[in-house]
Image (cartoon, helix red, strand yellow):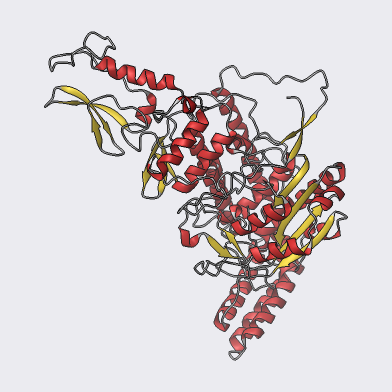
Amino acid sequence: MSNDSQGSVKGEAAITASPSGSASSQDPPLSPSTTAKPPELPDELVQAGWSKCWSRRENRPYYFNRFTNQSLWEVPVLGQHDVISDPLGLNAAPAEGGAGEGNLGNGQRKRRISEEQGAGLNSIKRVKVKTTTTTTTTRIYWDLDTQTNAVIREHPPPQLVTKLRQHYHELCHQREGIDPPRESFNRWLLERKVVDKGQDPLLPSDCDPVISPSMFREVMNDIPIRLSRIKYKEEARKLLFKYAEAAKKMIDSRNASPESRKVVKWNAEDTMSWLRRDHSASKEDYMDRLEHLRQQCGPHVTAVAKDSVEGICSKIYQLSAEYSRRLRQTHLSLLQDPPTTEVCASSQQSRLVYCYPVRLAIPSPPLPRVELHFENDMACLRFKGEMVKLNRGHFSKLELLYRYSCIDDPRFEKFLPRVWCLLKRYQVMFGSGANEGTGLQGALPVAVFEALVRQFGVSFECFASPLNCYFKQFSSAFPDTDGFFGSRGPFLSFCPVSGSFEANPPFCEELMDAMVTHFEGLLEKSSEPLSFIVFVPEWRDPVTPALTRMEASRFLRHQLTVPAYEHEYRSGSQHICKREEMYYRAVHGTAVLFLQNDAGFVKWAPTTERLAELTAAYRPSPSRPSTLSSPGPAPVAPGDKDSDSDWPARSPVPSDFLWCH
């Protein structure tokens, strides 16, 4: 913040001390009988927790900070009287330095003050940017010093989500009598964005086809009941009985053909008779019987449920389109005289430039005030009685990303509202269930990123967010909230011509397939060095189309597999979780594929030495405590799914999902 603002605040303090209104320091102080009205507090002080009060005993005003319980007679100055009033370090008074320091830029002065005063300056244990010469006691999970090598071709110029989730839950209960498959709504959002041509960054509104294949198969897979992984014989017996009973009940209550009724009823009654007759069967006998029952009854159950499940998918999409339209109207009404989009008549020749953060075309309207306070290690942002949280380390990370990337707010006046919007967006995207959606933001370990930087020149993440990114440049789902923190927006609409990229996509089959199409198109068009190192699950039963296409691609230079349980990921809730919950073991193998054009292969070839370091970096640290289990189990055989899993199965063979990024 400029020295002018400091001068204005100090000037107000001087006027308060002078009954004549003069700013001279020679005037006598106010007497107790003076009735001059003290100046109103600036908005920055109010946001920092300061309020003006009246002392009856002293018969004069004083100033109180509700965050620190600090009281002052004089008007407080941001960054001078306490450590909470200026948590971002933007308004600290300039140091008593010589002319050399006076010539420093605003950002340089802030960084020098931060380095000199350390963690105690802003009541935050400041997370410094990693360098080769500086070490800190605070563990960090990113490196914002890595310079980008991504080159682009520059051309001329929430609550409704929660409500939509509730509708989905109610429709599944009312029409099919089941709970919605865990995470199926989140996967639906991603699958729809692959084909969505609408304007809303989160809610699908213009999709073809209307019925989502992802949502349809996941709901259908849980009909008539959800199959689960069986550990004991008693569980297998109980599940077999429940499946037979549910299939018979469903075929009786639906408009099924006589042949379907006959087949399902006969198999269900035969199964129940066998259960009553045979009490010495083993777990394998029950599982074989269940598989036989599924094969006999499954097609008939699917036929009678097809119209109902399609109705669920269609209804959710129609509601989403309506909510998107309402949001669009609300946003436009907030903007005063929004500028019209000018179509460039003259075709200017494009140029190659280094990648920069996405910049919004429409200026930001005035933003409301968001309150900030700290509770132990958590930063808490409150707006209209609703609070979102993140740990102090990630709060400092967002501050650095904002400083590097944001161009329209040099005084950080809009920083807190934008952080609140960012956290709220991802909160409603994840959902409100326990651990729901956190797998969407899982990330590679720090050691793997470091190896990618050293050996393959990686400097850009294709699928990330400001909360889990390792680099200061990345692509993410929401340019409207993430663009202020370094995002280029969705990667499927990002077209680099050169650079080395890491891709760890959400494990949604449709999205991964669209990713492969985009990668091959970019590699085909560019003659500059271009490399994509892709991390996807090693799903073989059945194999995913994306993995099959990459293995057959002419741009594939090398492929390796990291075995299950021998590597780990960082939690998607890393910005709020405890340190011991930061990592979890992957319960399925991870395939690492190197897609490179000829120039990229020459520059970043996956040599034996480079691959050895990457593989070694994937090994879990022996000094780290035992990591948590993965939020989703590995792919399993039909009828052998984990009942506690958060992830529904892929069809035609049930297998569970694990999301990363």
Q: Is residue 262 left or right of residue 79?
A: right
Q: Is residue 315 left or right of residue 377?
A: right
User: Is the residue 145 above or below the residue 13 in the image?
Assistant: below
Q: Residue at x 34, y 31 (%)?
A: 80
> Splitting the image into 4 quarters, where does residue 216 fall?
bottom right
Could you say where residue 495 lies in the image, as x and y percent from the top left?
A: 77, 39
User: Is the residue 514 above or below the residue 371 in the image?
Assistant: below
Q: Residue at x 59, y 79 (%)?
A: 236
- 395 or 619: nearer the eye? 619
Could you say where residue 364 lies in the image, as x and y percent from the top left?
A: 56, 25
Q: Residue at x 58, y 58 (%)?
A: 182
Evaluate whether residue 445 shows in this view.
no
- 22 or 415: nearer the eye? 22
- 534 or 459: nearer the eye? 459
> Splitting the image into 4 quarters, where does residue 86 fall?
top left
Could you say where residue 559 lies in the image, as x and y percent from the top left?
A: 78, 62
User: Which residue is the extreme one toward the bottom?
Assistant: 280
Q: Is residue 162 left or right of residue 12?
A: right
Evaluate whether residue 393 shows in this view.
yes
- 349 or 138: nearer the eye? 138
Could you say where residue 631 lies in the image, as x and y percent from the top left?
A: 57, 63
